Image: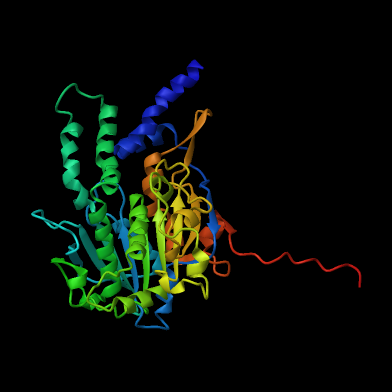
C-alpha cells in the first residue's frame, strides 16, 4: 500500500504538468521515466456509416471545373492566435496533394449590424482565408481559419493578476501552473454560456456566410466587414461548391449551436438576397463537420432539448412531411475522441435524435482512438499524456487521413485499414434465410 502511494505521488506531477501548459517540461520528464519505444499499439475504432472526406470533393472538380472545396476551421478553449491551424493545414494539403498556395492571404475583421454594440469596439474575431491548388491547377481548396478568442480575451484579463499571484501568499510551482491553465481555459466555456454567446455564435455565422456567399475573387482582401453588407456576397455558388467544418474542443458546440440557430430563426446570413431562394439551395446540400476532441455531450449539460428533437424522418427522409422546413439535406458529424482525453466525449447512441435539432438532419460517426500512446508505469498502472490526448488530433495521421479521404468499404485508406476497426452502422434488411439442403 505504501509502495503504491509512493508511485502515485511520484507520477502525479506527470499527470498534472501537461494540463498546466508546461507540456515541454512534462514531455521531457515523461519520456525519461515512462516511454518505451516500440511498435505503435494505439487503437482506433470507427462506428457509423460511410462518409466522404475532402478528397471526394477535390476529385469531383475534374468533372465539374467550377466547383470549389471550402473548409472552415473553428478553435476551442484557450487563447488562440491567427495561424493556430498551420500545422494541421500543412498535413492536410500534403495528403490532398495540394502543393501550391496563393501568395495572397485575405484577412477579414468580422463585424455584424445585428449586434447591439453601444460604445464598445466591434470585435468578433478574425477570418484568415487562404487558397490552395495542385500542380496542374485543376483542383482548388479555400481554407477559412476563424479566430474568435478576441471576444473573450477582455474578460479573461481580469484574472491576469490571479495568474501572476502578486497578492497574498505565493503558490507552489505546480499549483501556480494549474491555476494559470484554469484561468486561461475555463473562462471561455463560462463566457460562451453567459454573456459571450451571442457574439461568439455571430462570429461563426459571419464566417459561414463568407464561406457560402463569396468566391475567392469577390472576397475583400482586408478590413472590417459584415458579410451581409458586402457587395460580393451573392451566394451564387452555393449549389456547386462543397463545404466542410473542422472544429476542436468547444468549437464543436459553438458550430452546432450556430447551425441550429439558423433552423430556429428561419433566417439566412444575407438579408440582401431572397431568403427563400437561399434556403431552398441550402436544403439540397450535405455538409460535414469533423469534430476533434468533441464536447457535445459535456456542453449539453444544463440545456433544454432543441426546438425539434426526435423527428428526423419527417424532415429528412425522401418525401418527408416537413421536408421543406429542414435546414439542409444532411449534416454528417464525424466525432473524434480519445478515451484518455479528459475533455472529449464520444456521441452516445440516440444523442443526435434527442439533443440535435432534427431540421439539420444529423448523421453521426464516432471515431474513438488513442491519440496519445499509453505507457506502463512500473507495472502498476497505465498512463497517457492528457495534453497530447487533447491537443494531438490536429497532427495525428489517422485523423488527417479520415478528414481527407473519408471512409468507404470499396476505397479504404491503407493506413486506416491497417490501424482502425470499423463497425458500419446502417439500416439492415430482414435476415436472409440460408437455402435448404433439400432439393
For the C terminus, give its image quadrant.
bottom right
Tell me if residue 326 can be seen.
yes
Q: Is residue 396 above or below residue 106?
A: above
Measuring 33% from the left and 79% from the top, which residue is drawn there?
A: 277
How many dots with numbers? Answer: 0
Residue farthest along the top direction in this orientation = 2
Q: Residue lying furthest left in this view?
A: 119
Taking depth in this image into account, of 263 and 173 the one nearest to the observer is: 263
Tell which of 306 and 241 is nearer to you: 306
Res 90 seen here? no
Residue furthest right in the image: 439
* Residue at 48% over, 54% down: 354
Instruction: Name the residue rendered at 38%, 48% in the picture.
Output: 303
The answer to which quarter of the image holds residue 241 is bottom left
Q: Is residue 64 above or below residue 391?
A: below
Determine whether, in the image, residue 370 is placed left or right of residue 83. Answer: right
Display colour scheme: rainbow
Q: Nearer the viewer, residue 344 or 268?
A: 268
Residue 88, picture quadrant: bottom left
Q: Quadrant of residue 18?
A: top left
Above or below, comparing residue 85 to residue 222 in the picture: above
Tell whether 384 sits left or right of 196.
Answer: right
Coordinates of residue 64 in the picture (x, y in percent): 40, 83
Q: Position of residue 10 (x, y in %)?
A: 40, 24
Residue 327 relative to residue 234: left or right: right
Residue occupying the point 50% across, 28% down: 378
Q: Position of residue 14 (x, y in %)?
A: 38, 32
Amino acid at each position: 500500500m505504501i509502495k503504491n502511494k509512493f508511485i502515485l505521488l511520484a507520477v502525479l506531477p506527470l499527470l498534472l504538468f501537461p494540463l498546466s501548459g508546461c507540456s515541454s517540461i512534462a514531455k521531457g520528464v515523461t519520456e525519461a521515466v515512462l516511454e518505451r519505444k516500440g511498435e505503435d499499439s494505439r487503437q482506433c475504432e470507427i462506428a457509423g456509416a460511410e462518409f466522404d472526406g475532402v478528397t471526394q470533393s477535390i476529385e469531383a472538380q475534374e468533372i465539374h471545373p467550377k466547383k470549389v472545396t471550402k473548409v472552415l476551421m473553428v478553435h476551442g478553449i484557450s487563447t488562440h492566435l491567427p495561424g493556430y491551424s498551420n500545422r494541421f493545414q500543412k498535413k492536410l494539403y500534403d495528403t490532398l496533394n495540394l502543393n501550391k498556395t496563393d501568395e495572397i492571404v485575405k484577412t477579414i475583421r468580422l463585424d455584424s449590424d445585428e449586434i447591439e454594440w453601444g460604445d464598445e469596439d466591434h470585435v468578433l474575431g478574425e477570418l484568415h482565408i487562404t487558397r490552395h491548388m495542385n500542380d496542374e491547377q485543376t483542383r482548388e481548396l479555400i481554407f477559412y481559419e476563424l479566430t474568435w478568442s478576441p471576444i473573450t480575451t477582455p474578460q479573461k484579463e481580469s484574472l491576469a493578476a490571479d495568474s501572476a499571484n502578486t497578492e497574498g501568499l505565493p503558490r507552489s510551482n505546480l499549483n501556480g501552473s494549474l491555476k494559470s491553465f484554469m484561468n486561461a481555459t475555463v473562462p471561455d466555456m463560462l463566457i460562451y454560456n453567459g454573456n459571450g454567446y451571442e457574439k461568439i455564435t455571430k462570429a461563426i455565422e459571419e464566417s459561414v456566410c463568407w464561406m457560402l456567399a463569396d468566391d475567392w475573387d469577390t472576397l475583400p482582401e482586408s478590413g472590417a466587414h459584415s458579410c451581409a453588407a458586402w457587395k460580393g456576397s451573392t451566394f451564387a455558388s452555393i449549389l456547386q461548391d462543397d463545404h466542410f467544418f473542422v472544429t476542436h474542443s468547444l468549437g464543436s458546440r459553438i458550430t452546432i449551436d450556430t447551425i441550429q440557430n439558423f433552423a430556429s430563426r428561419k433566417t439566412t446570413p444575407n438579408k440582401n438576397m431572397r431568403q427563400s431562394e437561399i434556403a431552398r439551395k441550402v436544403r439540397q446540400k450535405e455538409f460535414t463537420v469533423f469534430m476533434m476532441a468533441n464536447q457535445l455531450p459535456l456542453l449539453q449539460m444544463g440545456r433544454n432539448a432543441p426546438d425539434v428533437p426526435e423527428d428526423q424522418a419527417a424532415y429528412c427522409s425522401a418525401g418527408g412531411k416537413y421536408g421543406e422546413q429542414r435546414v439542409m439535406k444532411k449534416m454528417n458529424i464525424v466525432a473524434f475522441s480519445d478515451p484518455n482525453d479528459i475533455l472529449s466525449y464520444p456521441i452516445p447512441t440516440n444523442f443526435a435524435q434527442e439533443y440535435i435539432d432534427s431540421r439539420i438532419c444529423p448523421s453521426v460517426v464516432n471515431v474513438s482512438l488513442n491519440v496519445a500512446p499509453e505507457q506502463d508505469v512500473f507495472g502498476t498502472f497505465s498512463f497517457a499524456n492528457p495534453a497530447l490526448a487533447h491537443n494531438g488530433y490536429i497532427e495525428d495521421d489517422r485523423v488527417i487521413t479520415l478528414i481527407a479521404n473519408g471512409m468507404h468499404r470499396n476505397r479504404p485508406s491503407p493506413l486506416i485499414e491497417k490501424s482502425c476497426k470499423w463497425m458500419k452502422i446502417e439500416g439492415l434488411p430482414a435476415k436472409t434465410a440460408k437455402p435448404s439442403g433439400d432439393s
